[in-house]
Image (cartoon, helix red, strand yellow):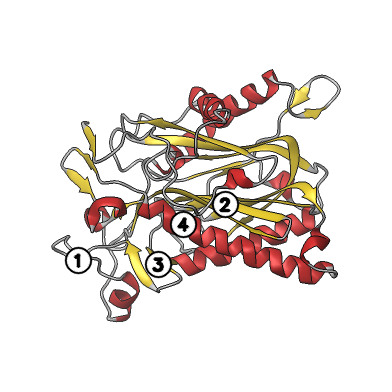
Amino acid sequence: MPLTQTGPTPCARANLSRAGAITDVPGIEAGHDTDTRRPTGVSVVIAREGAVCGVDVRGAAPGTRETDLLAPGNLVQQVHAVMLTGGSAWGLAAADGVVRWLEERGIGLDVGYGTLPLVPGAVLFDLMLGDSRIRPDAAAGYAACVAACAADAALAEGNVGAGAGATVGKVFGIARAMKGGIGTASVRVGDVTVGALIACNAMGDVIDPDSAAVVAGARTADGLALLDTRRALLRGERPQPVLPGTNTTIGVVATDAVLTKVQAHRLAVVAHDGLARAINPAHTMLDGDTLFALSTGHVALAALGDVAASAMTVLGTLAAEVVARATVRAVRAARTITVGTLRVPGGADFF
């Protein structure tokens, strides 16, 4: 099925503003692989030295890999990468390529019989655009790792990686939706850096928390303006039936603050506040919203406060902020695509 895209090619790498990126966190690398045939893709966040990891799943229709080992009471303490991918459950195969790339470089857990990379991941459903038989595989996961090594290249946003086939604002049907994407942001307070990488494929609209304005989402029946799903639902407009799991916002929050697994889990929980600020409705029965939290452990948590609980409050505030910013950037960077007869406008060129 033919695909056209307005603007730069999906693999173009450029920062859109000075909002920063998850790669500002020391010890973190990130990269994308994009398949323009459908479109779909993979994004990977790598922690070569290992990172304490937590996860929180809020959506009711998730697709995940290796999340049980992240429970605070379970044995494994660190992971070596997190994968975000399109292709629904088929896309989980891309993690095999991430594992292979890490193993080739001796990155992983020494289990006595070899070096075992630990790679949790989550998927989003992008099969409604183009030929669903085209989805990320092990080669795509490997290629995303190769891209992460391009130290001289800025981390791309919009129609790339796990955001390549993402859409948002589908409460009233895909024909009135807009293009989703992937976005990144970071903040630094004192010696602590927090960054996020978010692939937004939400059922709901995306809201700018600073202005409360809808920046992407369901459009009016004529397709020329934003509808505002929240107000439409409050007026009594009825949503269209949507297959569960055909949405989902997934992402990674990373920090260089030293965290335990319990604290990393809590950071993932609080980071979802950023999704709730930037997406409405969020965490629905039709989304599989999942966030991972990584700690590379380069800076003492006490840099944010003398008492651990107070320091975690500050860190959680930063995490929610970068998640919200990255979510908004994901759709603002997204460009219009046409797949067959379906035209999906992107925030970068819709207004």
Instruction: Please give the name of the residue rendered at 15% of the width and 42% of the height, measured from the top-left corner.
Output: 341
Q: Quadrant of residue 231?
A: bottom left
Of the numbered discs 3 and 4, the one sitting upstream in the chain is 3
Instruction: Count neighbours of disc 1 (C-alpha within 10 A) and say few if under 14, some if 14 to 19, many if 20 or more.
Output: some
Instruction: State the separation of the CA atoms marked 2 and 3.
Output: 17 Å
Residue 36, numbered label: none
Viewer-closest of 185 and 124: 185
Q: Quadrant of residue 314?
A: bottom right
* Circle nearer the viewer, 1 or 3: 3
> Residue 334 vs residue 288: left or right?
left
Instruction: State the separation of the CA atoms marked 4 and 1.
Output: 22 Å
**x, y (%) of residue 23?**
60, 43
What amino acid is found at the position of numbered circle 4 in the picture? Thr
What amino acid is found at the position of numbered circle 2 in the picture? Ala
If the image is split into quadrants, where does the C terminus sit? bottom left
Residue 327, numbered label: 4
Residue at label 3? 207
Q: Secondary structure at mark 3?
A: strand
Residue at label 2? 196
If the image is split into quadrants, where does the N terminus sit? top left
Residue at label 1? 220
What amino acid is found at the position of numbered circle 1 in the picture? Thr
**x, y (%) of residue 33?**
46, 31
Instruction: State the separation of the CA atoms marked 3 and 4.
Output: 9 Å
Q: Are marks 1 and 3 in contact (CB under 8 Å)?
A: no
Viewer-closest of 65 and 319: 319
